[in-house]
Amino acid sequence: MDEVAARANASAEAGAARSDRDVATAHSELPILRFLTCGSVDDGKSTLIGRLLFDCQLIHEDTLESLSSESRNFGTTGDELDLALLVDGLQAEREQGITIDVAYRYFSTPNRKFIVADTPGHEQYTRNMATGASRCDLAIILVDARKGVVTQTRRHSCIAHLLGIEHVVVAINKMDLVDFDAKRFAEIEKDYLEFAGVLGIPHITAIPMSALQGDNISRRSEKTPWYDGPTLLEKLETVDVSTATTSGPLRMPVQWICRPDLDFRGYAGTISSGSVKPGDHIVALPSARGSAVARIVTADGDLESAAAGDAVMLTLVDEIDISRGDVICSSNERSEVADQFAADVVWMSDRPLLKGRPYILRLGQQSSVCQISDLKHKINVETLEHVASRQLELNEIGLCNLSVTKPIVFDHYSDGRESGGFILIDRLTNETVGAGMIRFSLRRAHNVHWQAVDIHKDVRSTLKHQRACCLWFTGLSGSGKSTVANLLEKRLYIQGRHTYLLDGDNVRHGLNRDLGFTDADRVENIRRVTEVARLMVDAGLITLVSFISPFRAERRFARERFDGGEFLELYVDTPIEICESRDPKGLYAKARTGNIKNFTGISSPYEPPEYPELTLHGGSKSPEALVDDLIEYLVSNRIIDEI
Amino acid sequence: MHKSRHLKDLEAESIHILREVAGQFERPVLMYSIGKDSSVLLHLTLKAFYPAKPPFPLLHVDTTWKFREMIEFRDEITRQHGLDLIVHINEGGVAEGIGPFTHGSALHTDIMKTQALRQALDKHKFDAAIGGARRDEEKSRAKERVFSHRTADHRWDPKKQRPELWQIYNGRLSPGETMRVFPLSNWTELDIWEYILVEEIPIVPLYFSAERPIIERDGMLMMVDDDRLPLEAGETPRSMRVRFRTLGCYPLTGAIESPAVTIADIVNEIKAARTSERQGRVIDRDQSGSMEKKKEEGYF
């Protein structure tokens, strides 16, 4: 390990010189550069970052000490100091020799501070890269000089571009293994530019380097006399990323309302684009109420102006109603407000994205329930081809149409990342399951409005001497849902009630004939039935729905499509052994032999309701007795009058 | 003094995060540990909600082994700003006489710090605890989220950590779950000191060099802060010019010899430093990856 000590000493000397300069240098005025490194361990990515930290004297003595012992245990460089170990994070991963997730590193030179988002190149790449890239202005894409532009290079470039990164450095690494050959470098550069031309990445710099030996990283290599471009560090120190965000129109999403006393009302938020000064005319969206800026308040005194990136507090000339999630915009260049739009969605969860399933969409400080109304196509990030699909799996990207239950304020992602990027949240687990970049709003959102009519639900129900509602029977196949629903409808009919029964099997013969039994189709099946039931409730009917409806998320979605008290979830809880012994349609037998796939209770899950309005124990009571219970329930809840 | 662009950027990002906490959670709390990072965090909090007072209280988990000057400083700062301070001590641990000398640093930290913090969060039903941890402190923290999810039993489950894109933070919780929030994630130790310098933020005087009674034990310079320190045979406190790079329980916090008596001195010292700040902490020394283990158990 003599070499370790020698390197440490050499670096200590270099570092001492740099430190002296640091102390003497005035603070820089360049913004922090956030950049992303993409590539695999094989490309030497971790070595590259380790090299940057090492050369910039960011490695402390005690870190170096533990590194040399680790190099012996886990290293891949023999007795040499394995710089990659500086940046491979969690213990378990280190032992496996792979990195997962996004790790952040920090270093600075006298000229600039850097935040490195380090993302791995293996199969979790898309999710991790998208996360890391979302806030970066530059991406370093590593290419092994021996291999040239490969599938992975295209994948990384495509994702970087999709997330809005405008500056790409193509780090053509391991030049030492191709004898620093100028022709090889030119070849790879040309290949890359051709591919990048298709994508439309505006700023590309290719640099020949050896991260292992430090060539063209922080010091210019004498082995590449034919190269007259910048070293990697020069490029990073000088790149101008003060982009359109400061020159664009004002956007300030409101995070928090400040009301210390009755005389002060301030709107706190971070300006995501443009600039603002007192006297500027603004509108608050979505209400579109207008006013003018009175003051820009900060703890350091009022400001004369503020711009993108600043966290400020605005007070307005007029008292208008603004709450968290509203966006303060310049009055002559406003954000869009719509409830339907198209977006590129990156899927980040093990459970696939399903068309029709409700998610929570969060954009800035706004939240709304949303659904994927259409999945136009998936994008193959290696070939850029479009592929038809009904669902998105983990790490897949697709162009989707989305609809939200309340309109949101946004800009196109290409006009502003913070006002056009959103995340999708699973409503049961609260996990972040996807991210999206808005392309454009869908025009029909502006033009199709709910037609307000004079004869409405309440009037129709009153005429029928009942309260319209949806009785949603859920339970396993063979649990007795249809039998009970059928019997109940008969009893109601005899009493002169106006009813309709939507049965799972029957609907599948017509309206839902085109749907199968995959998860995606089941979700769509429920969505359509929900909408039909809703129209029938609107018509004043007591609507009975008898559907296995195995997923909580879909039943919850159905519930939310109705007004309060209108949706009654009736859980027909019959033990599966009994259902299977009944097997009225011989389905369990087929499922057991594998002749039916995705059969609920056997090869597909059933998620029982957590809080049903009523549980009907189908195993222990006769259908007649269950219907008696139901009638009693309907009377006590004033759905129908006492007979 | 002039504030550089990168400090302005960091300041704005932290304020944004603090406001998100106020906007997204019902009962947040600011973990105030009196050190330099906490001082910066408190300063940013005062700025984020100005002219209003912070919409959440401060919580100090007192292990009863903090430097005396830290406690004086804490009480003075909270009085000055009229802040709502909750001090929590694990009374069970006190009753059992838990301390670093009698029970060892690991057990002491677990009972008087980790367990105590859980008690305090449960007692007050806080749903978000804001802390001053930074990603550059330790290798395993490099992947820590700004909003770090904790299960209902306060565990950090790597699988439950959420991807964070743009400046959108997902603070949604199921019943019993909590969030730890780290507004200083992207700050380095040097950023902290430069910011303290330009913003003239008051800090505990222990950070400045002075003559202090010191003994040397296991290669660590330990300050004799009170008479609970059991001197071993041959140990006599002697006066040394030392200061502290981090502050915690006095028996677990090593001093460094240093002439730095101003913040500018400290900034210069950090820039020339050859060891990382955590070197002074006993808890990290056992083995590589130990921080990761502590985190899974609920250590901050």
Image: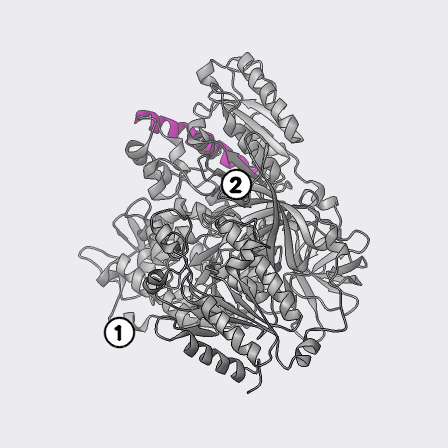
List the residue tagged with mark 2.
A396
Q: Nearer the viewer, residue A381 or B177?
A: A381
* Quadrant of the rendered image containing residue A542: bottom right
Q: Main secondary structure of the magenta part?
A: helix
Q: Identity of the amino acid at label 1?
A: Ala
> B23 left or right of B120?
right
List the residue tagged with mark 1.
B95
x then y, percent, for residue A514: 57, 48
Q: Which marked residue is nearer to the observer: mark 1 or mark 2?
A: 2
* Label 1 crowd (10 A; few <14 / some 14-19 / many >=20): few
Pick the quarter of the image with the C terminus of chain A: bottom right
On what subunit does the disc labeled 2 rest?
A
Q: Are marks 1 and 2 in one subunit?
A: no
Q: Secondary structure at mark 2?
A: loop
Question: How far apart are the alpha carbons under marks 1 and 2?
Answer: 56 Å
* Label 2 crowd (10 A; few <14 / some 14-19 / many >=20): many
